Image (cartoon, grey):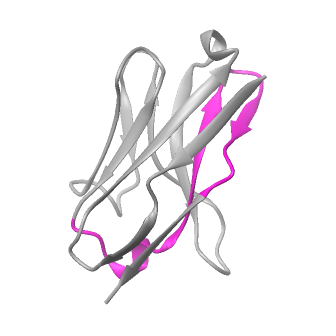
């Protein structure tokens, strides 16, 4: 089992920045990929960014050039630096961990970008 705890969400004006953090505990040795997803009201959950255990990153087209996923050490914690935020970035952001067999989710953190 892997437990994930997000922090760093909040309210920010358009053009501003936020940094989300995700701390993992439990069987973190088994994690292959960690990532951030978001879900806006009335919309499906979507991938924002992911980073593999080898450091390969992947971003949604909508956030490329604005968001950066990173980590302090091999797997923990994982950060999402969000710059040039837009109102359409407003959503609940979820941390995700994948060990190749199972997916684990955090409780989510709200990000609200005002225009």
> Residue 24: image x %, image y %?
59, 28
Q: Is residue 110 above or below residue 87?
A: above
Query: Which residue appears at 66% of the width and 45% of the height?
Result: 106
> Residue 33: image x %, image y %?
54, 26
Quadrant holding the C terminus: bottom left
Query: Which residue appears at 65% of the width and 28% of the height?
Result: 98
Seen in the image, is 36 located left or right of residue 16? right
Q: Nearer the viewer, residue 95 or 56?
A: 95
Query: Residue extending furthest bottom?
Result: 115
Quadrant holding the N terminus: top right
Q: Is residue 22 above or below residue 92?
A: above
Question: Where, by quadrant of the figure, is residue 14 drawn?
Answer: bottom left
Query: Residue extending furthest top?
Result: 29
Is residue 76 within the magenta segment?
no
Query: Which residue appears at 36% of the width and 25% of the height?
Result: 56
Q: Is residue 58 above or below residue 67?
A: above
Question: Where, by quadrant of the figure, is residue 89 drawn?
Answer: bottom left
Q: Nearer the viewer, residue 57 or 81?
A: 81
Query: Which residue appears at 62% of the width and 16% of the height?
Result: 28
Is residue 98 within the magenta segment?
yes
> Residue 8: image x %, image y %?
44, 54
Q: Nearer the viewer, residue 89 or 114?
A: 114
Q: Which residues are magenta?
A: 84-108
> Residue 100: image x %, image y %?
69, 21
Seen in the image, is 74 located left or right of residue 98? left
Q: Nearer the viewer, residue 11 or 38?
A: 11
């Amino acid at each position: 089992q892997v437990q994930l705890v997000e922090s760093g969400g909040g309210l920010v004006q358009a053009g501003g920045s936020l940094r989300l953090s995700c701390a993992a505990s439990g069987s973190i040795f088994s994690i292959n990929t960690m990532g951030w997803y978001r879900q806006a009201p009335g919309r499906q959950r979507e991938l924002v960014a992911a980073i593999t255990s080898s450091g390969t990153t992947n971003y949604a087209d909508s956030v490329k050039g604005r968001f950066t996923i990173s980590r302090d050490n091999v797997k923990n914690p994982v950060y999402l630096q969000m710059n040039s935020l837009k109102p359409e970035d407003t959503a609940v952001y979820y941390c995700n961990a994948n060990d190749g067999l199972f997916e684990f989710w955090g409780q989510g953190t709200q990000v609200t970008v005002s225009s």
